[in-house]
Amino acid sequence: MHGWLWLVMACLAGSLLPLQAQQTEVPTTPLPSVMLPPDLNRVLRDYERAWQARNTEALVSLFVADGFVMQPQRPPIRGQVGLRQAYQGAGGPLYLRALAFAQSGSVGYIIGAYRYQIVGNDVGKFVLALRRDDGKRWLIAADMDNSIK
């Protein structure tokens, strides 16, 4: 009975090796940028300006009142008070580009990449989940990012 169990486990482990190899392959060329409609592009450009200016209040104002920030190695943060604490003192050079987007009614998203120089390689990626406010302005409901390394 034990020999049979080992045989099954060995077969399962062997069948997972190709899957593991597929998951570790890294693309060698960056994905192309996509053009955003002006109202979605404004979200990225406003985020860049607030981040570059180290303007915590301007950054927080881009979020819905109960917005989330999901940063690597940290627990989720929700709401304006938490956002202020998370972004306090943060900022510097930042350049965002969109890889994909969608919008339908009052919800949308932008998937993108970022770097710290105007020209150069991406150093991270992000997903912005968006909601429209009553004035039809897109606001960030959730900001999730992580580095490429």
Image (cartoon, rainbow, N blue to C red):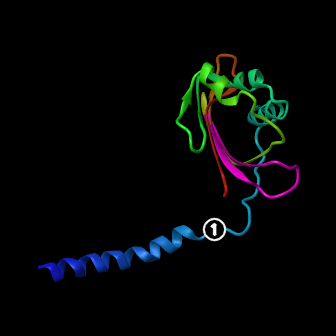
* Mark 1 Cα-neighbour bin, 10 Å: few <14, some 14–19, many ≥20: few
Q: Amino acid at mark 1?
A: Val
Magenta: predominant secondary structure element?
strand
Asked whether residue 76 is drawn in magenta, I would say: no
x then y, percent, for residue 98? 73, 47
Q: Secondary structure at mark 1?
A: loop
Residue 22 lies, with reference to residue 113, above or below; the image says: below
x then y, percent, for residue 73? 57, 44
Q: Residue at x 74, y 54 (%)?
A: 123
Q: Nearer the viewer, residue 89 or 33?
A: 89
Asked whether residue 120 is drawn in magenta, I would say: yes
Q: Residue at x 84, y 32 (%)?
A: 49
**Which quadrant holds the C terminus?**
bottom right
Q: Residue at x 79, y 33 (%)?
A: 51
x then y, percent, for residue 5? 19, 77
Where on the picture, by quarter, is residue 19? bottom left
Give the magenta-colored segment's residue range. Answer: 108-128
**Which quadrant holds the N terminus?**
bottom left
Q: Nearer the viewer, residue 79 or 137?
A: 79
Where on the picture, by quarter, is residue 148? bottom right
In this image, 63 relative to 94: left or right?
Answer: left
In this figure, which residue is indicated by the disc labeled 1? 26
